[in-house]
Image: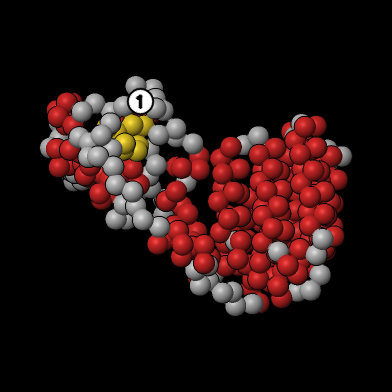
Amino acid sequence: MIPLDPPSDPTVPPPRRSQTDIVVASILSMVEAGRLSPGDRLPIEKDLAEQLGVSRGSLREGIRALAVLGVVETRQGDGTYVTALDATKLLGPLTLFADRQMNAEPAQLLHVRRVLEAESAALAARLATDEQIAAMTALLDRLDALLEAGAEQSDISAIIDVDTEFHGRIAQAGGNPLLAALVDSLAGRTYRSRVWRALEERGVTAATQGEHRGILAEIERRDPDRARMRMHLHLLAVEDFAATHRLDTTPSETDAEDADAPIQEEPSGNEYSASVDANTSAL
């Protein structure tokens, strides 16, 4: 049997890390050790470069990489700061892959969403507070009102928005911020597939609302297994639809408006903060 991690050859020197890698690893280490906390301002470029033993150019490259990862952010004229390090921001790089996957194989992304949300429903059945359940109930009442008002024909996006919020509330009630952030990210990227299904299958939104009520009933009864099963079946229908239909992945009008929005310029800050902003905005 071949070992998964064969021993390294002691005669071969380990690969040399670039100065940029040193910057990234060093700042991440400072964050993990608590020497840098969310909201802290990084030292000025000259001092930080000397502290890490790297050139200013390498420092800027490392800061740019950390900005892309959501670990730091630059404020024009004020320096570079550690972000709040919330899960949504740190999952930013994952969303790029999710977007590409949604365009290429939407059913695969929907499969991942089903796995995650089924477990989030089970967690919510164990941990949701009465207040959280009441908030979910209020959302479904809003959805009922939209359906009664004929929104299925006139405002399908309003229905999908409430649907998305309901799923987000379940994930938040599960008490796992990372899982909730993943669910929120994937739900946003499957938006068009759900709109497409609502337009293609007559009466599907009413049926979906019935499934929502069933999921909530199991959460309220504190039955994790049945809540998991109901969420699994609920999302399987969307996944099956995506697997058998070609989805329109053309950017929406909102996307186009966002893309065309002008970028506001601010006064330039210190040298490496300005460099980070200029290069990050180009990514």
Q: Residue 82 in the image: state x and y as whole percent.
A: 36, 32
Residue 105: quarter of image? bottom right
Which residue lies at the image location 60% right of the left edge and 78% below the top edge? 246
Q: Nearer the viewer, residue 10 or 112?
A: 112
Most extreme residue toward the top, as rendered? 35
Which residue is more in the foreground, 26 or 183?
Answer: 183
Label 1 element class: loop
Which image quadrant: the C terminus?
Answer: bottom left
Horizontally, residue 44 falls left or right of residue 148, namely left
Question: Which amino acid, by three-letter code, is at mark 1?
Answer: Asp
Task: Please say if 60 is above or below 31.
Answer: below
Q: Is residue 282 visible?
A: yes
- Residue 224 visible in rendering: no
Looking at this view, is 200 or 25 the one in front? 200
Splitting the image into 4 quarters, where does residue 180 fall?
top right
Q: Which residue is disc 1 drawn over? A: 40
Query: Is residue 256 rendered to the left or right of residue 148?
Result: left
